[in-house]
Image: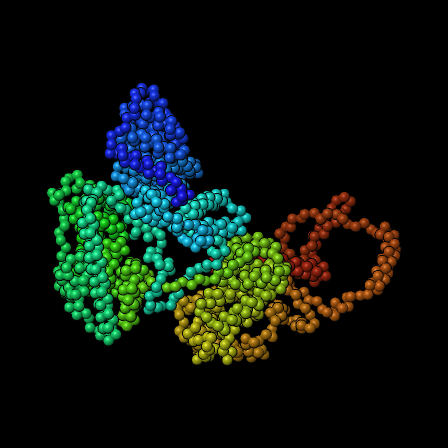
Amino acid sequence: MSTTAEYVAKFPRRKKLLETVEKYWLEEARRPPGSLDSSLKKHTTLLNKLKSSLLVGPAETFIKEIDGLTLTKYLEEIVAAVVEGSTKKGDSEIAVDIIVHLHTRLTPDFLPLLLQPLLSILSSPNSSTTSNSAPANKDAEKDKEKEDKERLSKQRPVLRVLAELAMIGAWAEGPTKGASEVGKILKGFMTGDTQYTNLPLLTTFLKYFVRAYLGPIPSSSKTTQINGDATETVPLPEGVTELIPVEVQKKMRDLFENYFNSASKTLVKGQIRLLEQDRRNHEAYIKSGEIFEDRQQAYEKMTKAVERLTTGVNTLAELLGLQPPVLPTAASLAKSGLQIVESASSFTVREDGPIAGGIWDDEEERRFYEDLVDLGEVVPSALLGIKESKNTNDTATSEEGKQEDEQKQKADEADLQRQLEQMELQHDKNDPTPTTDSQAQEMSRTVSASTSGEPMEQEPLVVIEDDEQPTIQDTSVNEDDGLQSGPAARLTALLAALPEANNREVVDKLAVEFAFLNSKAARKRLIKFIGEVPKQRTDLLPHYARFVATLDKYMPDIGTGVLQILDEEMRYLQRKRLVRELDSLRLKNVRFYGELAKFKVAKPYTILHVLKVFLDEFKFNIENISNLLENCGRFLLRFEGTKETAKKMVELMRRKQGNSHLDQRHQVMLENAFYMCNPPERVAREVITLSPMQSFIQHLLHDILMKRTLDKVLKLLRKLHWGDSEMYEFILSSFTSPNDIKFGNIPYLAALVYDLQRYHPEFSIAVVDQVMEDIRIGMEENIFKHNQRRIATIRYLGELYMYRVVGAGVIFETLWSLLSFGHADPFPVPGRESPIDAVDDFFRVRLACTLLDTCGACFDKGSQARKLDQYLVMLQLYVTCKAELPMDVDFMLTDTLDTLRPKMPHLRTFNEAAAKVDEILALGTGEGQSAPSIYDESDDEEGSEAGDRGGHEDPIESNEAEVIALSEGNEEEEEDNVVLIRNKEKEQHSEMDEQAQSEFDREFAKILADTTDARRDQRKNAPPVFDTAVPLIRKKDVGEQEGKMQFTLLSKKGNRQQIRSLDIPLDSTIAMNSRSHQAQSKAEQEQLKRLVLQNEWRLERAEVQGQSYLVM
């Protein structure tokens, strides 16, 4: 690193070279004594050495050889050889010594010819523009990296040589000119280098010349902590001076500090992106078990870029004596959660915004409004009308002009403060009268004066009420008004391209192009063109404002002319403030004013005067105030010169808003404008961090679960560690939160509960218990924001019934509780009120319809059908006791009733529903049954079904028999369940003593053996069995005789079978048995046919219902 001691050590040599260069700028070229060789061979040898060993030396050898040659005939070849040799690696001081010696021999032509190609090497397009273009593919990226490496290795020695030459006066204008040229080169390296490819080049420059070009530097952080001093305290010894002017050193230091700040911000953003990419890779690995190659390559590329930038920024911080940025870590990012804006309204303006002290929203916006092209660096001074002042009188005159501008601005500020105080006093006195004419005139003159800089002799702004059009000067320019045909055509093309300029680079390019066409006629034509922006093209206003701001520094009449047009246009619009057809023109005018204020073309206090005009006529200018604050309110509240006054104006606007009766649209517009320019404080919401296993469970239920993945999800869930209490609790909470998954996946969640109950019975019980508890809590709290959760929970309960996790009794208990919970009376009556079930609250009806749509179709037979019929009547009675049904609830209830009971009449009035309820109660009492009640639990579900199937059987009491229902058939049909009855007394008798059983077996085996031996001889003497096969006999259509039945007799005579037909009386035993057997066989076939058809019908019905659930 270049320190003060090193600078002092090199100063005598540099000072001597500076004196030599300055001497031969004034004198003729030196001619060595003796004869000089002019042969081509000797000169070619020198040229080859310059190309290959300029930075290697030794310098004395080159000097001796140079003094022996004429050189004058080969000036251009020597320049080309020195330029080529400067790109090689080596010591720049050797090259500078040789170049200075060549200057003494070839002055004054050598250095001007040499400096231009050296500067072109450093300012070539490869230095910045091509380094930012994105490579098309992987090979192109490698080629680009190779090109950048070659370019940097070539430019690094050239930059060192050029920096040394600038300090020793290689430019005829002196070291100041050389230092400024080096500064332009460095600024070119920094500008547009978004990838920071040129960072190694800049660090190399600082390593060798930081003391010479930037002056005394603050010490590093470690030195600062030890010594407590922020800058170098070592003074320069006597006789040692600064080779670079102090003003240039200050500019160079500011340039490098800004570059360091920009690189630090980019590094922090890159670190954040890298951590986010790492987190996404981790999530992808959890989901799929692998990280794809392209994602991994992108991460590695980003890691290398961040590491390279970190090294460069740390080196810059050390060389500049600044603190390196603190990079975020994964832990720090995890602590900062989502930023949420508070909804509370406030009438006060906060001192700082969400970005502490930031005028702009982000870095890109700051660059758009602040980083303007300096036309003086790219356009010749003659075209801009700049004359270099060499006397102090011009400097004094400019300083006096600045003082006058400051005094005028202070006067405007004091005048605006006085007017604000008057407005506040009038507001405190509740004086509704509008501003007087004299005040309006005075305020209008202030606006005009602050806009145009002329004496305050303008007409009033808001008091004129005529129909005159805005008086805008005719600035149309013909080609004869000073523009020749060539420039005029180029200007026409430029103005035609200006509406298509939709980015910063194009606007800057057009501004530079216009500067080359600069003339009074061209400026007038441009002012007229910009003043006539189409009112629909508000997207052009920021780019037009940047265009004007770029030109305004050297052509102030353009900004003044555009502001004059906007001022006159605003006067006209204020006179026509009641004409609504001009709203789009007002929007364009106000936004253009705001954009020019952010570029400081319109002075900040000018825009405050405009806001003051709008506040005077508050009710007529609400839209103008909103548009102005949305566009530049943040700038006015953060800009150092206007924040106090702007704060008072915004507070005044809020007070007027609170005391005025405005419609909803205007209220919303003002609220939005206020929070756009003064965002409320944001509070961090704590983010719940899940463990990897918990994230995996959520991923299974939220992302993977569907019909075709049920088995896969079930297997994965069974593999979890169910013995861990924390894991069990999380699984239970996930299965009892159906609102967290897709509504269409709720049936699959219930199917998982059904499958898991075989392995974890207590889990299904806990799920059902929690679901019932959630339904009860929902009815107790009845909070609107939980309605979606309640709908999902009630649907979940219905699906649990469809998968046989709960019984019909639970469903009916829930349905009846929806009608009676929270009420003193069990039956709905008109006027029945409850704090948790208001008359105009119909959400319980929605819940009942949702549950019935889910599982109500199963209650279509037996006692369950009768219970459902009774409930539907009671539901309609409940609905008639409430207020008038909303249309959507009415349609939902009608669809449910039509689906479950298409033939049931709809009960629209309370009298009809009450009569139907009385009929049901009377019918129940006449049959000797108790009236239907939600507390009637006397009939067990399975017992009632058994009674329906066989009413002649006696009921089996619970203490004598255990009924086990095995669902072998369709799930919707509970009537066909097979019922096995095990009597406890028989079960006790069947448990015999093992000894008695063994004795019985032995005696039985003995008797069986004796019987077998006794009958063995009888079997041998038995007649042969008729084992002839029955032949196939085709029956002939022969009519039977009345009272007789035809039989066929098969007999055998010898080896021949004989068949005869016999007529047997019907009252004979054989005929009666045969007819009985035929009737029994036919009945069995009919029964089998009925069962098969019924089973097919059930399967078709189950398939249709399953498809309807999936559609829902």
Q: In which quarter of the image is residue 77?
A: top left
Q: Position of residue 1046 (x, y in %)?
A: 68, 55
Can residue 575 be seen at all in this image of the molecule?
Answer: no
Q: In which quarter of the image is residue 134?
A: top left
Point 32% across, 42% down: residue: 243
Residue ranking furthest to the left: 480
Q: Position of residue 847 (x, y in %)?
A: 48, 68
Figure coloring: rainbow
Point 44% across, 75% down: residue: 838
Q: Quadrant of residue 724?
A: bottom right
- 602 lies above or below 45: below
The tally of labels here is: 0
Q: Where is residue 1056 in the image (x, y as percent from the top left)?
A: 75, 44
Q: Where is residue 58 in the image (x, y as percent from the top left)?
A: 40, 29
Q: Which of 37 and 1066 is in front in this view?
A: 37
Q: In this view, does 403 lie to the left or right of 861?
A: left
Point 27% across, 39% down: residue: 174
Point 20% across, 60% down: residue: 408
Can residue 911 be seen at all in this image of the molecule?
Answer: yes
Q: Which of 373 and 55 is in front in this view?
A: 55
Q: Is residue 472 left or right of residue 676?
A: left
Q: Nearer the viewer, residue 158 or 592?
A: 158
Residue ranking furthest to the front: 238
Q: Which of 944 and 1073 is in front in this view?
A: 944
Question: Quadrant where the N terminus lies?
Answer: top left
Q: Is residue 681 left or right of residue 433?
A: right
